[in-house]
Amino acid sequence: MTDYYIITKTELNLDGFLTETDQGYTQDIELVNDMNEEYDATYGKFYFENKTKIELGKVTIKEFFDETPFVLNAGKIVNDFEMVKELPLINNENKNTI
């Protein structure tokens, strides 16, 4: 079976709530790894380093998104093309259009 990795964009909406929106899919495992490494190095790192402060209300997620408008990750994997057929194919040539 073929794996399809769904690329999700995480950002704050105008009401200050986190939103996750599926932007497309890829089968390029190198692109998946690059996106997920970038996600871990930015948002993941911020959250891990500030988890207690966030829980105590001393730091907000908004502070991260004030500096970084959105992050991408490819954490959902499906093996049925029907689940991604409405999404655009993302590759190295068009990844910056997200």
Image: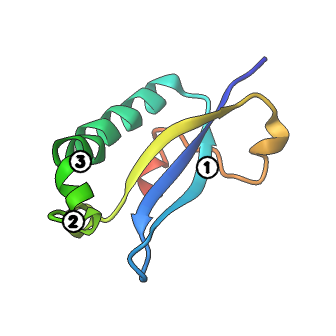
In this rendering, the label closer to the viewer, 3 or 1: 3
Q: Which of marks 3 and 1 is nearer the N terminus?
A: 1
In terms of secondary structure, where does tag 3 sit?
helix
Q: Where is residue 41 in the image (x, y as percent from the top left)?
A: 24, 38
Q: Label 3 is placed on what type of residue?
A: Lys
Residue at the extreme front of the image, as rendered: 56
In terms of secondary structure, where does tag 2 sit?
loop
Tell me the distance, in whole angstroms, between the alpha carbons under discs 2 and 3.
Answer: 10 Å
Q: Residue at x 85, y 42 (%)?
A: 82
Tell me the distance, in whole angstroms, between the alpha carbons under discs 2 and 1.
Answer: 34 Å
Label 1 environment density (alpha carbons within 10 Å; few <14, some 14–19, many ≥20): many
Horizontally, is 50 left or right of 69 in the view?
left
Up the image or down, 56 lies above or below 73; here it is: below
Up the image or down, 8 lies above or below 14; here it is: above
Query: Which residue has dot 2 on it?
Result: 57
Q: Where is residue 62 in the image (x, y as percent from the top left)?
A: 27, 68
Count of residue discs: 3
Q: In which quarter of the image is residue 37?
A: top left
Query: Which residue has dot 1 on it?
Result: 24
Q: Label 1 is placed on what type of residue?
A: Gly
Horizontally, is 14 left or right of 3 in the view?
left
Is residue 90 or residue 4 the one in the foreground?
A: 4
Q: Residue at x 39, y 37 (%)?
A: 35
In terms of secondary structure, where does tag 1 sit?
strand
Query: Which residue has dot 3 on it?
Result: 51
Q: Specify the quadrant that holds the N terminus.
A: top right
Q: Label 2 is placed on what type of residue?
A: Gly
Horizontally, is 53 left or right of 27 in the view?
left
Q: Which of marks 2 and 1 is nearer the N terminus?
A: 1
Label 2 environment density (alpha carbons within 10 Å; few <14, some 14–19, many ≥20): few
Q: Where is residue 67 in the image (x, y as percent from the top left)?
A: 19, 64
Q: Which of marks 2 and 3 is nearer the N terminus?
A: 3
